[in-house]
Image (tube, coloured by chain):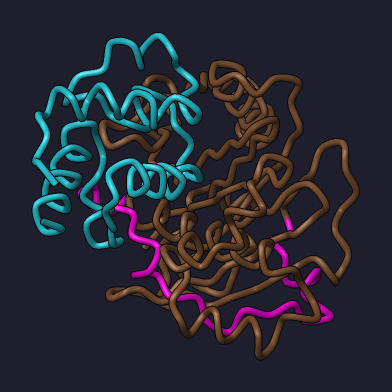
Amino acid sequence: MISTGNDIIALNIIDVCRTMQERFYSKILSSTEVEEYFRDHALTISFERYIWLLWSIKESVFKFCKRHSPNLAFSPKKIICGRVEAPLAACLLLPADGEIEDNSLPDAGNCWCSVAHTDTGVYYSRSIVLKDIIYTVVNDTNYFHNTWWGVKHIDSACNTCQSESVRAFTMRKLKDIYPVDTRLAFGKHAVGYPILKVSDADAALPISFTHHDRYVAYSFVYDTENKRIPAATSG
Amino acid sequence: MKIMDRRVILDELKKVLLPYTHNKEALNNINEQTDLIKDLKINSANLVDIIIDAENQYNIEIDMDAAEKINNVGSCIDVIIEKMASTN
């Protein structure tokens, strides 16, 4: 199905002590995911970052699914992350159409992939883990060529500023894609996900916003080569 | 443990939600229909914090099956009362 989901975590406001408590992380991670960390990743990434990496993957999968299942509730332990890895060439697997404002593109060491499962589907993720943020975008195929994403640092963490900034940031990119005279605006579905309106009509463009503290980010799906929203493909 | 009045729990929940609420004005005026994310602008990354703080406040354990029912203040009170009853 055509959708998108992304999530950003501002690591500077994470309570590391609480994150490391079993009582906290056991509400997010399955025992299998904890075991996988200590077996495969303990030398590569700190445990608290691993916890928030998996949170961002799970939250992104939830957002992806919510567009097609409006009554879905977020239950992180029902989304199981497997094959979490940071291969040397992971940077090459990142969605191509991404931007990180005021920052350099990540190197191979902080790009992560995973395959996440729910009762009803399989989802593929790309994450970047930087000093200050963890950012994830997901798709239901392992093909991200049409997935556009961006991360931006903003000056204020107030909710209004976050909301306005992420919309302005996304709109700037959309205006690069749509013809210059196209009338674009954002709306919101009753369930909560954002809608792009083109000349007041729902463009059915899958789009996802995320913000945390002084960071905002977006993802959307658009086939620029053929100038259309891509058709759904099976995994 | 005595089962508490919903109104009392709602007032106590304000203190639990305070550190995570961006919209402080909305917090002062919450009712059972108040949505934690849409109305109070609580970031989803803080939902586990809120669950743990509620567990501490009421000496209960909220598993994630119960937690996924929580979307507004009323459903949060429902889960707290249910868990307090099963703890007795």
The quadrant the N terminus of chain A occupies is bottom left
Q: Where is residue B35 in the image (x, y as percent from the top left)?
A: 28, 29
The residue located at (48%, 50%) in the rendering is A229
Q: In this view, does A199 lie above or below A105?
A: above
Check if residue A80 falls in the magenta segment: yes
Q: Nearer the viewer, residue A136 or A47?
A: A47
The residue located at (42%, 34%) in the rendering is A194
Q: Is residue A167 left or right of residue B61?
A: right
The residue sitting at the bottom extreme is: A39
Q: Is residue A25 above or below residue A187?
A: below
The quadrant where residue A212 appears: top right
Colour cyan maps to chain? B
Q: Which of A81 and B1 is in front in this view?
A: B1
The quadrant where residue A180 appears: top right
The quadrant the C terminus of chain A occupies is bottom left
Q: Is residue A204 left or right of residue A20?
A: left
Total marks placed: 0
Q: In this view, does A130 lie to the left or right of A191?
A: right
Part of the protein shown in magenta = A67-96
Q: In this view, does A41 lie to the left or right of A212?
A: right
Check if residue B26 falls in the magenta segment: no
The residue located at (18%, 24%) in the rendering is B8
Q: Where is residue A76 in the image (x, y as percent from the top left)?
A: 40, 62
The residue sitting at the front extreme is: B1
Q: Where is residue A202 in the image (x, y as percent from the top left)?
A: 35, 32
Q: What colour denotes chain A?
A: brown
The residue located at (87%, 36%) in the rendering is A102
Q: Which of A77 and A141 is in front in this view?
A: A77
